[in-house]
Image (tube, rainbow, N blue to C red):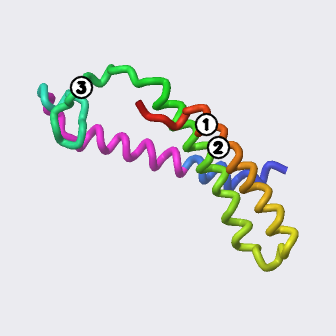
């Protein structure tokens, strides 16, 4: 019964061994010099303009969460587009209802001012 899991266990061991090996080689072969510029937070090769501990507005997180929600919902359009001809008119109307619900949600969020960046 457990014979079916042997390939999965082998794959997990290989993946863990590869990750551990890479980390070990980086530790052994990597540079060890430490200086002040190296220990600063990296920001595209430039010195940081503001403190990395600066707090962000809640609006930033709200916009980010809304982006993720609507972005994930759009993923459902790809399977529909792939099966468009096979689904026929029923699939078309179902997707139009889905897009309408998304549009109503986007309109609601927009009207509430959640997308305003101040």
Residue 58 percent location from the top left of the image: 49, 24
Q: How crowded is mark 1: few (under 14 residues within 10 Å), some or many (20 or more)?
A: few
Tell me the mark number nearer the camera, choosing from 3 and 2.
Answer: 2
**Which residue is under mark 1?**
111
Residue positioned 74% across, 54% down in the render: 100
User: Percent from the top left, x then y, of residue 31?
Assistant: 18, 39
Check disc 2 and report its element: helix, strand or loop.
Answer: helix
Provide the residue span drawn in magenta. Answer: 14-34
58 horizontally vs 2: left or right:
left
The quarter of the picture where residue 92 lies is bottom right
Q: Looking at the image, which residue is at 55% across and 33% down?
A: 114
Q: How far apart are marks 2 and 1 (CA)?
A: 6 Å
- Whether pointer 2 and pointer 1 mark residues with C-beta atoms closer than 8 Å, the reply is yes
Q: What residue would you read off at disc 2? A: 107
Mark 3 or 2 closer to N-term? 3
Image quarter for residue 39? top left
In-front residue for pair 113/50: 113
Magenta stretch holds residue 52: no
Q: Quick one: 41 or 96, which is closer to the camera?
A: 96
State how many labels appear: 3
Q: Name the residue under label 3.
A: 50
């Amino acid at each position: 019964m457990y014979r079916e899991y042997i390939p999965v266990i082998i794959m997990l061991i290989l993946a863990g061994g590869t990750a551990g090996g890479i980390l070990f080689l980086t530790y052994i072969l990597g540079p060890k010099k430490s200086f002040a510029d190296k220990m600063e937070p990296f920001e595209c090769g430039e010195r940081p303009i503001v403190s990395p501990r600066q707090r962000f507005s809640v609006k930033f997180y709200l916009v980010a969460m809304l982006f993720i929600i609507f972005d994930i919902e759009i993923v459902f359009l790809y399977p529909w587009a792939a099966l468009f001809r096979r689904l026929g008119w029923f699939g078309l109307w179902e997707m139009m209802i889905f897009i309408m619900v998304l549009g109503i949600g986007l309109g609601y969020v927009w009207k509430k001012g959640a997308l305003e960046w101040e």
